[in-house]
Image (spheres, rainbow, N blue to C red):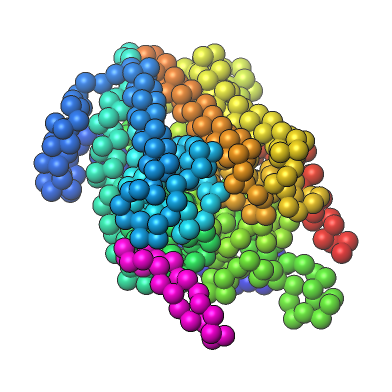
Amino acid sequence: MMFGITANSWLQLGLYMCALTALAVPLGAFMARVLSGERHFLSSVLDPVERLMFALCGVKPEAETNWKGYALGVISFWLAGFLLLFVLLMTQQWGPLNPQGIANLTPDLAFNTAVSFVTNTNWQSYAGETTMSYFSQMVGLTVQNFVSAAVGIAVMAALIRGLSRHSTDKVGNFWADMIRANLYILLPLSLIVTVALASQGVIQTFDANVTAKTLEGADQVIALGPVASQEAIKMLGTNGGGVFNTNSAHPFENPTPISNFIEMLSILIIPAALCFTFGKMVGDRKQGVAIFAAMTLVFVPFTVAAIGFEQWGNPHLVAAGADTAANMEGKETRFGITNSAIWAAATTAASNGSVNAMHDSFTPLGGMIPMLLMKFGEVIYGGAGSGLYGMLVFVILTVFIAGLMVGRTPEYLGKKIGAYEIKMASIAVLLPCAFVLIATALAVMTPLGQAGIYNPGAQGFSEVLYAVTSATNNNGSAFAGLGANTPFYNTLLGVCMLFGRFFVLLPVLAIAGSLAAKKTVPVSAGTLATHTPLFIGILIGVIVLVGVLTYAPALALGPVVEHILMIKG
């Protein structure tokens, strides 16, 4: 054992990272061809479908817009999706595919859920198997799993065009980008993962719930549903909303160690691959490798720390006569500590939010790791598209800071970074942080917020802080132990999800438009190389410092205090 980590844990983490990298490189190259409108191996099969969809929707892919037109497309599409989903959830009782006769959602829960799924957050303050009809799950939530992920990929593509083009105000066609992301990337990958998961026993059925007799002779209702197809896009689209309340800890969603490995890969595969997509689209693969390296150099140590804290556990257990101090509370025995900790790190590094263990049952510092990964802004791989464009915002800030250090005008990929880009980048980084802290303060200082806190002291504070961080950063995972299905929390977290998504997305599009209009500056002897180990180190330092310095007091009041209390017994 090294640093409290077993050899088996090192082996499993190493296998996971090797598989992720091996799959990300070719997928990234393929997605670059898709988003550039080039031909690829699926063109001969799906091009007719693409042309039909363009014709039906009246989309002319060559008719590109400036960043404001692109943003208008995003907002109008989001608004239409929100309204349709809200109405569906408010009327599901009378809709089809509802064999359980599940009732309509309350207005505050319908608002929260609709905002959650259209912003790619997938926060759930309800139990899916008892609250959602099959029709709501498939037509309402699963559709948004696809299109909300495609919106993130589309905005990322617009930012890449802003960096790679010059002397133009055009950043692409939102409708064409979104259709292509769904048709060529999300749908084929989801089909592959669905079949793989079904082969492991993940269920896929429209049958009503069944009632079984327990050994004691009592009746137990077993919920069913079309799970495998929803599980695939839940992971690939970095959505995370589960069919069942226990999410991927449920044996119908995640029955075997093999299904667990497939799902963990699915969480990060698209965000990781988009780094290589970026390198190909800007014509400099080293840039993509540098960003992937920065993400990995943050992710791996934090994952190791999470595993270590859980394996170290609570030393008082050994003193009380237990064989080990390792913390298995809240974890499935078929996955164990290592796979639970890797999943917790992956789901919060990405904007996924699914769980295969209860984060509330982690040790205080073990639970702080996923909280910190979210507080970095969901840029360590991050969501589908949103992770990369969030990371590029940090890259722009890093270039600016490094330029100040050496007294040169900051440049990135041949574009001078000016005051406008820095203002937009600052908004994208700092406003979500402000929402997290303000919303947490509102929750812990008002009677309506306090009414949902079931655990006193540091643990209760951590649960609120985690929930608000998850909502604002569009993650969706929960620390549990918080009564979130109330009008107060449904509204508060819904607003956090809304502003957390669009106060990053809109500044990113503004940066794309500004950079696209600029001329390319030739590389000179004083140009800062942005693919070197030095720049990668500075970039990591900026990300970590922003996250730690912003949230250090809040973390001290929650997990740090709780850890001290645990050590003192």
State the residue lying farthest toward the right.
568
Residue 450: quarter of image: top right
List x then y, in percent, for residue 551: 71, 37
Q: Residue at x 66, y 70 (%)?
A: 328
List x then y, in percent, for residue 481: 67, 54
List x then y, in percent, for residue 21: 42, 54
Query: In front here: 428 or 76?
Result: 76
Q: Which residue is drawn at 52% across and 49% down?
A: 124
Q: In this view, does 233 lie to the left or right of 389?
A: left
| Vertical order, 290 against 198 (above or below) | above
Q: Is residue 293 visible?
A: no
| Vertical order, 52 against 357 (above or below) | above
Q: Is residue 130 visible?
A: yes
**Magenta stretch bounds:** 203-225
Query: In front here: 373 or 39?
Result: 373
Query: In front here: 421 or 91?
Result: 91
Residue 224 in magenta stretch: yes
Residue 36: quarter of image: top left
Residue 564 in magenta stretch: no
| Vertical order, 294 against 192 (above or below) | above
Check the picture and name the quadrant holding the C terminus: bottom right
List x then y, in percent, for residue 419: 54, 13
